[in-house]
Amino acid sequence: MKTVHEEPTLISPPTQFAGVAIRLKALAFDYLLISAYIFLLAAVSMAVIKISGVLGLSLRWPENPVLADLMAFITLILPVSLYFALSESSRYLEPWAVLIPGRWSAL
């Protein structure tokens, strides 16, 4: 006699998805965070240039365009891409700004 083995069904609670307005506000918040990073990166770069001028060092932008593109990629594009990739691959599969309780009541 052959027995039938049934897989237990997993019942997950209903998922409430964030609406378009909340997602757009979260995107704006993410870009605000990224803009702050860019501002910090520019401020540090300007400080390094000023300090090197005081010390008598000559810092010039790389004359090799491949090196200049590589520097831009490593300092700007890669961190921003990693931020979005890691936040979207979190266990909630959403940017963290969408998950903050009471997140948009003040906006």
Image (cartoon, rainbow, N blue to C red):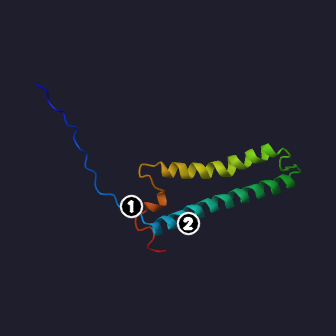
Residue at horizontal 13%, vertical 26%?
A: 2
Q: Which mark is residue 48?
A: none
Write down the residue under mark 1: 17
Residue situated furthest bottom in the rendering: 106
Are circles 2 and 1 on residues that touch, CB within 8 Å?
Answer: no
In the displayed structure, 20 sits above or below 76; it is: below
Circle nearer the viewer, 2 or 1: 1
Residue at (81%, 55%) from the top-left corner?
49
Mark 2 falls on what kind of element? helix
Which residue shows up at 81% across the image and 46% down it? 65
Q: What is the distance, in whole Å, between disc 2 and disc 1 at their CAs?
A: 18 Å
The percent coordinates of residue 103 (x first, y second) are 44, 67
Picture layout, residue 8 above or below residue 43: above
Which of the 4 image quarters holds residue 44? Answer: bottom right
Give the left or right position of residue 55, taking residue 102 as reference. Answer: right
34 with respect to 90 (left or right): right
User: Relative to the observer, which residue lies in front, 23 or 32?
Assistant: 23
* Amino acid type, label 2: Ala
In the image, is 101 to the left or to the right of 51? left
Residue 28: x and y in percent read 55, 66
Query: Left of 89 or right of it: where is 81?
Result: right
As rendered, which of 92 and 39 lies closer to the eye? 92
Q: Residue furthest top?
A: 1
Mark 2 or 1 closer to N-term?
Answer: 1
- Residues packed near mark 2 inside 10 Å, few (<14), some (14 to 19) or many (20 plus): few
Question: Residue 28 bears which disc, if any?
Answer: 2
> How many labels were placed on the picture?
2
**Residue 17 occupies quadrant:** bottom left
* Picture coordinates of residue 60, whole percent (x, y): 85, 50
Q: Which amino acid type is marked by label 1?
A: Phe
Q: Residue at x 68, y 61 (%)?
A: 39
- The N terminus lies in quadrant: top left
